[in-house]
Amino acid sequence: MTDTARVLKEARDQSRLTALDYAKVLCPDFMELHGDRQFADDGAIIGGIGHLGQDPVTIIGIQKGKNLHDNLHRNFGQPHPEGYRKALRLMKQAEKFGRPIVTLINTAGAFPGIGAEERGQGEAIARNLLEMSDLKVPIIAVIIGEGGSGGALALAVADKVWMLENTIYAVLSPEGFASILWKDGSRASEAAQLMKITSRELLQMGVIDHIIAERGYFSSEIIDNIRDQLIKEFTELKKLTLDQLVEKRYHKFRLF
């Protein structure tokens, strides 16, 4: 098994910590908020408020299930448009109250069903990209599993984009890439190597800003490390004026 194939397997491992797992440990007083105030509450996206250290933050994450029943409720971590609109509602609320935002990303992609398309899936993702680029609060995105396609990017227009060591970030799944390029989805491992989806490759290309080590650490140690680094990074980002913050974010993504 190649290193890329190993990372792909680990990124999709069902035993990985979920967004809620991280949120509840990063912020022991985490309080979840629900609904997009337009259509429904999407279980695939969780969000709420809590204290990171001494400071209030908003945490938003894409949530996969831990068993079949939970996965059905979470739609296997594939958000509907109402999920992205809930996320945007919470981000605008965070901006209103001056709370930094942490996004936790783990999705194969946005849900491609007909109902989601009828309710404006593309518009919901595009709206998040537009609004996040101009939010006047610090944003840090952390990929904690799969970072798939526009479904992941809709929560990743951030001042800093981090990845856990054994996670992936890509424009589509390796299976989809292989099916399009070679008409053979079984060549996913080969496709994954060509796509350069691992944290090390993406850091070298400048797509992400930081890798969080996983190998050799217990889950509790990884979360403690993330908490410490988030507090440190938000302290640095808060030194910028709001205009400087937005301008730097704009230029960061204009590079692509």
Image (cartoon, rainbow, N blue to C red):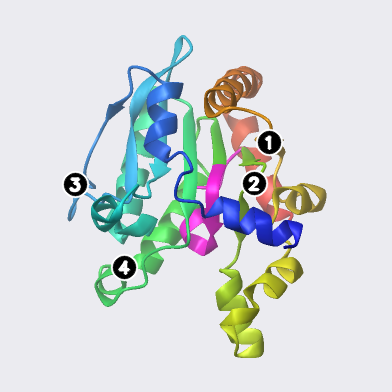
Residue 124, horizontal then vertical, whole percent: 37, 60
Tell which circle, 1 or 4, labels the residue nearer the N-terminal end: 4
The residue stretch that appears in magenta: 143-159
Residue 217, horizontal then vertical, whole percent: 64, 28
Distance from disc 4 to disc 3, alpha carbons, whole Å, reads: 15 Å
Asked whether residue 149 is drawn in magenta, I would say yes
Of all residues, the one furthest to the front in this rendering is: 1
Tell which circle, 4 or 3, labels the residue nearer the N-terminal end: 3
Of all residues, the one furthest to the top in this rendering is: 54
Bin the neighbour count of mark 3 within 10 Å (Cα to Cα): few under 14, some 14-19, many 20 and up: few
Of all residues, the one furthest to the right in this rendering is: 204
Seen from the viewer's position, the closer of residues 93 and 32 is 32
Tell which circle, 3 or 2, labels the residue nearer the N-terminal end: 3
Nearest to viewer (mark 2 / mark 1): 1
For residue 37, the mark is 3
> Could you say which quadrant of the image residue 88 lies in?
top left
Q: Which amino acid does label 2 sit on?
A: Asn
Distance from disc 2 to disc 1, alpha carbons, whole Å, reads: 8 Å
Q: Name the residue under label 4.
A: 120
Q: In this view, does 163 lie above or below 99?
A: below
Instruction: Using residue 134 as the reference point, say whether residue 240 is left or right of it.
Output: right
Q: Do the residues labelled 2 and 1 touch (CB within 8 Å)?
A: yes
- SS at circle 2: loop
Residue 189 visible from this viewpoint: yes
Q: Name the residue under label 2.
A: 166
